[in-house]
Amino acid sequence: MADKTATLTINGTSYDIPVLSPTAGPDVIDIRKLYAQADVFTYDPGFTSTAACDSAITFIDGDEGVLLHRGYPIDQLAAKSHFLEVAFLLLYGNLPTADELEGFERLITRHTMIHEQMHYFFRGFRRDAHPMATMVGVVGAMSAFYHDSTDINDERQREIASHRLVAKMPTIAAMAYKYSIGQPFVYPRNELDYASNFLHMCFAVPCEEYRVNPILARAMDRIFTLHADHEQNASTSTVRLASSSGANPFACIAAGIACLWGPAHGGANQACLEMLREIGTVDRIPEYIARAKDKNDPFRLMGFGHRVYKNFDPRATVMKQSADEVLELLGVHNNPTLQVAKELERIALEDPYFIEKKLYPNVDFYSGIILDAMGFPTSMFTPIFAVARTVGWISQWKEQLADPQLKIGRPRQLYKGETRRDYVDIEKR
């Protein structure tokens, strides 16, 4: 129930509109009945001022640099927890007990293999297919292999689908990578943790043993953790919109992957790496800094600042720690791109222009550096993002299906086309 009201006057007629108060964040004007009462729509391109749902999963305060999952600050989760514990938190609302976590980890670990016939599906793609193209197709095709978890009205089937997607997404992403570079698929191993297993599937080859470095595994786990959910962004909204039609879970997550593929959404860390490579060497940094400060120059520094976070990205501090650990382990002396990154980071943290504009290095800056240092090509950056975000998409999907107010999504429009006109026979045109 609303405890406040707002009054809207249209052509001399006033309407009392309920104002809803959240547990955190700005009040929300409830316009659900506005069209029926006043025969008007609201206009909000990009839905940047519109709450399309209520949710209890993730809260962001961009002005203060706050990101909470079920109330827990992301920096605490990234520093003290690990990805599968955060996955449990997102899915079920609370941090697990020791027994619950052990059971959840065992469940996910023992469902990482995919149906053997899906291997043929991979081989239907061109050898140079982008891994994201492969993932969109393969994840969408999961509904053809796992018929026992597509009934969204069956709570048990929803649960099975949730576990399958979290468990199998790293395997699918690793197989997409292996296929793109012409190497044999590597099966998952049950003795490895989630992040280590993913690295092993990506970098192991049958002809020799591959041991996962714990520093790299920890960095990968943090990348997964820091990207697990980010409220109602474009891909999450896509998953929710697809779900509102009653689509099966695999189709919904495939839709989310397709949206994430857009360079304005999931490609930020790739764009950052490409910018670092364009700069090329440390001595060229002043030139690009000058261009970034020039309002008439279209060049923009990628990986600095954030659309949502107007202060600092709370994920970046923890990611910087991992970046420092990885670069110390692997070294940057022979890598000009990473040398540029380190110097650019130093300048951005000291230059008055960057400090005044609050252009701090964000999570994409550091994750791009880490993935590049590990040996991933930029084409794998967004698939890795998809692996991490899958649990967030599923949590939002589950929450939506349990919402008694669920309706099929149907945005309105401000029509600016022709009004009614009569058909003209072709010989008279």
Image (cartoon, grey):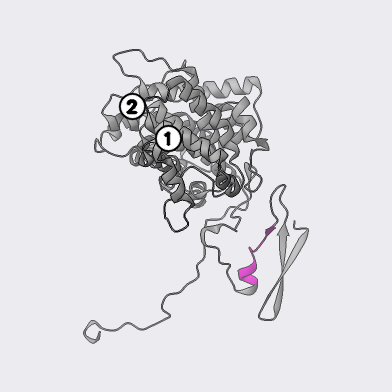
Find residue 2 and report its horizontal and vertical position in percent: 75, 58
Three-letter residue code for mark 1: Val
Q: For this view, does 247 lie left or right of residue 377?
A: right
* Residue 394 visible, this angle: no
- Residue highlighted by disc 1: 340
**Residue at the spot x=54%, y=46% of the render?**
306
The first of marks 1 and 2 along the sequence is 2
Question: In the rendered view, would you say 315 is above or below 201?
Answer: below
Residue at (60, 38) in percent of width and height:
314
Q: Is residue 276 visible?
A: yes
In the rendered image, the quadrant that contains the C terminus is: bottom left
Q: Which secondary structure, mark 1?
A: helix
SS label for mark 2: loop
Residue 142 horizontal side relative to residue 7, left or right? left
* Magenta range: 28-37
Residue receiving disc 2: 116
